[in-house]
Image (cartoon, helix red, strand yellow):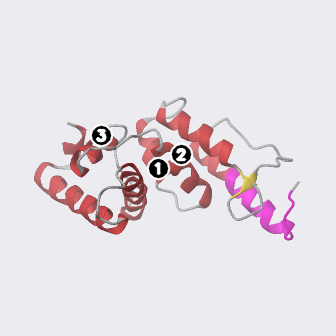
Amino acid sequence: ACKSDDPGTCCLLKRAVLKNYSDMGSTEQLDQGSTDTLINGCKAHSEAAKRLAKRLYNLEGFKHCDVARQLGKNNEFSKMVAEEYLRFFDFTGLTLDKALRAFLKAFPLMGETQERERVLIHFSRRYCHCNPQESTLEDGIHTLTCALMLLNTDLHGHRCWLQ
């Protein structure tokens, strides 16, 4: 049951989370009477996001290509999943190119430009979190990350980051 002032909003958000699960082909479903809280104050389902992130990281019931598809979605639940997924990576002390290479060894970064962009934003945020001593802001790290991706793709094609 939703404890929001607007039960219609809660139902829509719960349906969006359920649809997100079915889009991924996951057998894990939210209970209809779930009391977990969603990001916008209704009821956040951070535990479900943690479970899905762990399953994606360990490829439990998912393929490598499913990871980028999930992390690149533009909804609150997917953002929570991406944040949890990136916690599996420790980029402390790594240069940006080495951190990016380590990250992209986990899955191929495929999909539309906007989806890839969202994944790289999550990466940049995590890199900054792991390296707070860096004087470059998150936007600067993101710009450098995109530049590295473009340069390497131009030079070596899409498979260059997997080596």
Foreground of the two, 92 or 61: 92
Q: Image point 40% across, 64% down: which residue?
A: 114
Question: Which residue carries the number 1 mark?
Answer: 69
Give the mark nearer the N terminus: 1 vs 3: 1
Apparent side of residue 45 relative to residue 122 in the rendered image (left or right)? right
Q: Main secondary structure of the magenta part?
A: helix
Foreground of the two, 137 or 59: 137
Identify the element where label 3 is drawn.
Answer: helix
Q: Image point 34% across, 49% down: which residue?
A: 109
**Contact (Cβ within 8 Å) of mark 3 with mark 2:** no
Question: Which residue carries the number 2 mark?
Answer: 84
Q: Let me know if residue 25 appears in the view.
A: no
Count of number-bearing discs: 3
Q: Amino acid at mark 1?
A: Arg
Occupied quadrant, residue 116: bottom left
Q: CA distance from mark 2 to mark 1?
A: 15 Å
Q: Residues within 10 Å of mark 1 (few under 14, many from 20)?
A: many
In front: mark 1 or mark 3? 3
In x, y percent, where is residue 38? 71, 57
Q: What segment carries the magenta color?
A: 2-17
Q: Residues within 10 Å of mark 3 (few under 14, many from 20)?
A: some
Give the mark nearer the N terminus: 2 vs 1: 1
Identify the element where label 2 is drawn.
Answer: helix
